[in-house]
Image (cartoon, rainbow, N blue to C red):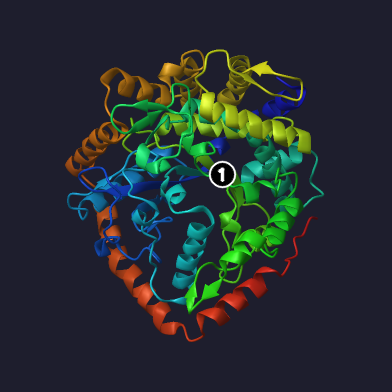
């Protein structure tokens, strides 16, 4: 353990005993494809009975009309966030008929690009913008990549804890917002250095249906009738088969500062890219994309972690960050775990919290271009070969064993877990580390390893294996009761969200072209952030 980490842990023991770490704020966003009884992506519209996907705060869609997205409120207790997610599933299954929610990250059976329906958010300007943005993703990257699902985990520390940390580090002369932003970026840099660690431990996508690759030969092993299976992959979702883009790669965002991050994204949304210009923005009255720039909007930038701030109605995400600093971070590299009804459980959440606080309290120098390239290579090796015996990863000190690095991280995290458990007799963070630790030396215990072994031993196809899991989970949600208050809330939100969408559509008077021009003019405006 570094001296700096030991100093910070020691200095936070008092606040920990006061229960301040028990006030960590957590939120979960979970995606899941709707599929038919044969394990094919659903072609039906988002059910009206689930509310408006434009305005509902908890049930929406991501890229596709078929890609459900559930959003929990912010909670301090993991079990509360999970209970809310569980009831969102129960409520949905009330109206899905024979359809199922696909419990893995890699998609169900597809039939070409057009079989992934683009989400329709109605004819308000903001609804049209959301759909045109998705059309832009289609012409740039194709729809098939957008059918992949995952879990996003939102995390922040309570303000009282930030005040203690600020005093501990002698930063009283700096505004709290500026201090918090700088330290969140330190957390993000350490996360980037070690995100491969999470992808190995929690990766759950070693297989794909052949329809996902549309006949491409990517070196995976053929299995059963129509499955492509990797003997060593941890997360094909996070590999170059998933959310990867060569145009975005040249942005080289390694999160060294808020100013660099905002400036790079602002440059990307205002800089034309020749290949996108060739596609065209609008033709014959039909919008193909929002613009022809490197990024249409900030959210198009793919990353395994993001700094976030809830934006006001007149702000873009980067302007919100620029004006008031980082509010929370969003972890985006988590596969759905098909062995868990919600794709995630309390053990994983407590482990993630320990890892994130370890990233925050550990030394975090700036990432050089050389180190940035090595980190990209480490992640690439782990997602495609993470369960390979004796795997080596590149570091600034040369090639090192992945297993030995994991043991070092685990050892260093132990004291952080004890700190987080100082006011909790059940020791959930320490218990989470103990539960996950055996995966270091036994890849068969990882979700990817378990999936591989079950498919390999049974000879079953990926679609059939996953379909059985989906039916099992559907029965679980249909057979377990909902919280009555949440049932009433979701029923009410169905109608109010539809009314809110109608109100937006009726209130819009300017043309979409004018609306979009105003949006991007405003998006290019810098905002002032007080550093002291």
Residue at 69% x, 40% y: name it. Answer: 164
Residue at 79% x, 55% y: name it. Answer: 531
Whole-percent x and y of residue 239? 53, 36
Closer to us: 182 or 299: 299
Residue at 26% x, 65% y: name it. Answer: 48
Quarter of the rendering occupied by the N terminus: top right
The residue labelled by disc 1 is 244
Q: Is residue 9 above or below residue 178?
A: above
Closer to us: 428 or 64: 64
* Residue 168: quadrant of the picture: top right
Whole-percent x and y of residue 502? 36, 77
Query: Which secondary structure, mark 1?
Result: loop
Q: Can the viewer see residue 366 in this picture?
A: no
Quarter of the rendering occupied by the C terminus: bottom right
* Residue 356: quadrant of the picture: top right
Closer to us: 135 or 387: 135
């Amino acid at each position: 353990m570094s001296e700096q980490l030991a100093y910070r842990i020691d200095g936070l023991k008092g606040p920990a005993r006061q229960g301040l770490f028990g006030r960590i704020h957590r939120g979960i966003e979970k995606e899941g494809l709707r599929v038919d009884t044969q394990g094919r992506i659903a072609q039906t519209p988002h059910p009206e009975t689930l509310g408006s996907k434009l305005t509902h705060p908890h049930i929406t869609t991501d890229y596709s009309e078929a890609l459900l997205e559930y959003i929990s409120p912010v909670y301090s207790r993991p079990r509360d966030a999970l209970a809310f997610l569980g009831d969102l599933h129960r409520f949905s299954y009330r109206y899905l008929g024979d359809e199922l929610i696909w419990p893995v990250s890699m998609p169900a059976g597809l039939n070409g690009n057009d079989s992934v329906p683009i989400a329709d958010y109605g004819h308000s300007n903001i609804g049209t913008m959301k759909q045109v943005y998705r059309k832009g993703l289609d012409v740039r990257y194709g729809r098939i990549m957008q059918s992949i699902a995952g879990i996003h985990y939102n995390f922040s520390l309570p303000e009282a804890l930030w005040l203690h940390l600020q005093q501990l580090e002698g930063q009283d002369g700096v505004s709290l917002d500026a201090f918090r932003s700088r330290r969140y970026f330190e957390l993000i840099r350490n996360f980037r250095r070690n995100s491969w660690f999470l992808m190995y431990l929690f990766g759950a996508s070693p297989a794909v249906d052949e329809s996902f690759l549309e006949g491409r030969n990517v070196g995976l092993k053929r299995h059963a009738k129509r499955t492509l299976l990797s003997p060593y992959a941890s997360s094909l979702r996070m590999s170059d088969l998933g959310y990867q883009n060569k145009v975005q790669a040249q942005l080289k965002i390694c999160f060294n500062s808020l100013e660099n991050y905002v400036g790079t994204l602002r440059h990307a949304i205002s800089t034309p890219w020749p290949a996108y210009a060739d596609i065209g923005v609008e033709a014959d009255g039909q919008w193909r994309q929002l613009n022809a720039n490197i990024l249409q909007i900030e959210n198009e930038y793919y990353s395994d972690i993001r700094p976030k701030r809830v934006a006001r109605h007149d702000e873009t995400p980067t302007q919100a960050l620029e004006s008031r600093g980082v509010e929370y971070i969003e972890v985006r590299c988590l596969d759905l775990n098909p062995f868990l009804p919600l794709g995630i459980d309390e053990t994983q959440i407590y482990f993630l919290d320990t890892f994130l606080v370890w990233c925050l309290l550990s030394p975090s120098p700036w990432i050089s271009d050389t180190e940035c390239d090595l980190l990209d290579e480490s992640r690439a090796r782990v997602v495609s070969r993470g369960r390979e015996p004796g795997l080596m990863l590149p570091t600034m000190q040369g090639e090192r064993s992945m297993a030995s690095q994991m043991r070092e991280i685990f050892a260093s995290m132990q004291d952080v877990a004890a700190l987080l458990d100082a006011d909790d007799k059940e020791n959930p963070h320490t218990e989470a580390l103990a539960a996950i630790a055996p995966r270091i030396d036994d890849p068969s215990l990882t979700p990817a390893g378990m999936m591989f072994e079950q498919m390999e031993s049974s000879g079953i196809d990926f679609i059939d294996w996953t379909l059985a899991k989906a039916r099992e989970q559907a029965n679980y949600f249909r057979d377990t009761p909902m919280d009555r208050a949440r049932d009433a809330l979701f029923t009410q939100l169905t109608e109010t969200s539809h009314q809110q969408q109608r109100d937006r559509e009726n209130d819009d008077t300017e043309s979409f072209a004018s609306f979009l021009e105003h949006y991007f003019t405003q998006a290019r405006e810098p905002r002032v952030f007080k550093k002291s």
